[in-house]
Image: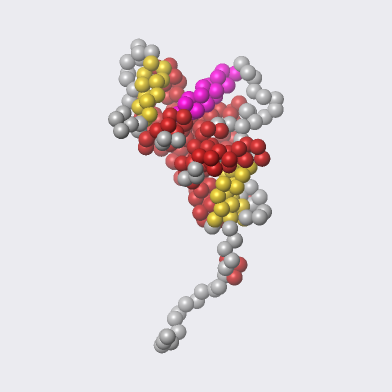
């Protein structure tokens, strides 16, 4: 391996907090308005979940009041939240484990 | 596939009523400031319920676009209804939705239900007056949305 002849002019601060990728969660909350069949379809078509998984998630939302429907980087969860809001679902984002 | 898309029979009076609701919804989206209306608040939920600053920042960056997409969906529905015959003597029309239009229709029917639910106080106690005519519209939208979901799932082979 060769050494660089010049020190690169990189002035980047290492963000130690960001180093371990802490996952974020997309949470969908129960509401009395959205139809069960519709919520299953949204989970199935938007996330590509098989129908049985989509149905289980919908039932968790319905019975437990909320369910984590996706996990991943914060930015991705924010994109998902906007999509859920487009469908009229009540979705929020939180750090995993909160 | 021949006749692909979704064929939905719709009575003329239903089409007319839905058209009026969609116009009112477009007016609401156009004329109302975010934060001033409970129904619009429901359509743009706080994404970080325990962090008001982060939620506000997110809303500032995204809510206007979200409501623009709502309006675009509603215009798809309006265009579909407009494509029905002008012949109001026909009691039953057949609505044909392309697969690409189905999501806009479902999102709009769901949004109309959320708006009516907010106006009626569906989530509140005591429950709304069972004689309130808006409750009938709300139930009818739910019935229509459920049929549409069923037809769309069938089209997907699910």
Residue A90: which quarter of the image? top right
Residue located at (63% from left, 18% from top): B130
Q: Is residue A47 above or below residue B126?
A: below
Q: Is residue A15 visible?
A: yes
Most frequent secondary structure within the magenta stretch: helix
- A23 lies left or right of B82: right
Residue A23: give x, y in percent of width and height: 58, 58
* Residue placed most toward the observer, B40 or B124: B124
- B20 lies left or right of B60: left
* Residue placed most toward the observer, B31 or A51: A51
Q: Is residue A67 above or below residue B128?
A: below
Q: Is residue B58 above or below residue B110?
A: below
Magenta highlight range: B132-148
Coloration mode: secondary structure
Q: Outermost residue, right direction?
A: B126
Q: How many marks?
A: 0
Q: Outermost residue, left direction?
A: B2
Q: Which quadrant is the N terminus of chain A positioned in?
A: bottom left
Residue located at (53% from left, 37% from top): A40
* Residue placed most toward the observer, B99 or A90: B99
Residue A20: give x, y in percent of width and height: 59, 66
Residue A54 drawn in magenta: no
Q: Is residue B27 visible?
A: no
Residue B59: give x, y in percent of width and height: 54, 48
Residue located at (42% from left, 24% from top): B19
Residue located at (40% from left, 20% from top): B9
Residue B33: give x, y in percent of width and height: 52, 39
Residue B137 drawn in magenta: yes
């Amino acid at each position: 391996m060769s050494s660089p002849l010049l020190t690169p002019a990189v002035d980047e601060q290492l963000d130690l907090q960001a180093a371990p990728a802490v996952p974020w969660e997309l949470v969908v909350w129960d509401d009395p308005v959205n139809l069960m069949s519709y919520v299953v379809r949204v989970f199935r078509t938007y996330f590509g979940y098989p129908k049985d998984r989509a149905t289980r998630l919908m039932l968790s939302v319905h019975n437990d009041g909320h369910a984590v429907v996706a996990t991943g980087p914060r930015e991705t969860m924010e994109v998902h939240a906007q999509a859920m809001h487009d469908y009229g679902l009540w979705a929020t984002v939180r750090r995993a484990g909160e | 596939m021949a006749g692909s898309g979704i064929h939905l029979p719709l009575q003329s009076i239903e089409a007319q009523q839905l058209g009026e609701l969609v116009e009112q919804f477009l007016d609401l989206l156009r004329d109302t400031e975010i934060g001033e209306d409970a129904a619009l608040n429901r359509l743009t939920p706080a994404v970080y319920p325990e962090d008001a600053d982060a939620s506000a920042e997110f809303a500032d960056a995204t809510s206007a676009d979200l409501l623009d997409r709502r309006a675009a969906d509603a215009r798809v529905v309006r265009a579909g209804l407009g494509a029905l015959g002008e012949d109001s003597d026909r009691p039953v029309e057949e609505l044909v939705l392309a697969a690409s239009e189905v999501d806009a229709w479902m999102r709009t029917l769901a949004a109309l239900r959320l708006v009516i639910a907010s106006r009626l106080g569906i989530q509140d106690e005591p429950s709304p007056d069972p004689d309130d005519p808006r409750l009938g519209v709300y139930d009818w939208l739910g019935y229509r949305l459920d049929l549409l979901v069923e037809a769309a799932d069938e089209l997907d082979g699910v």
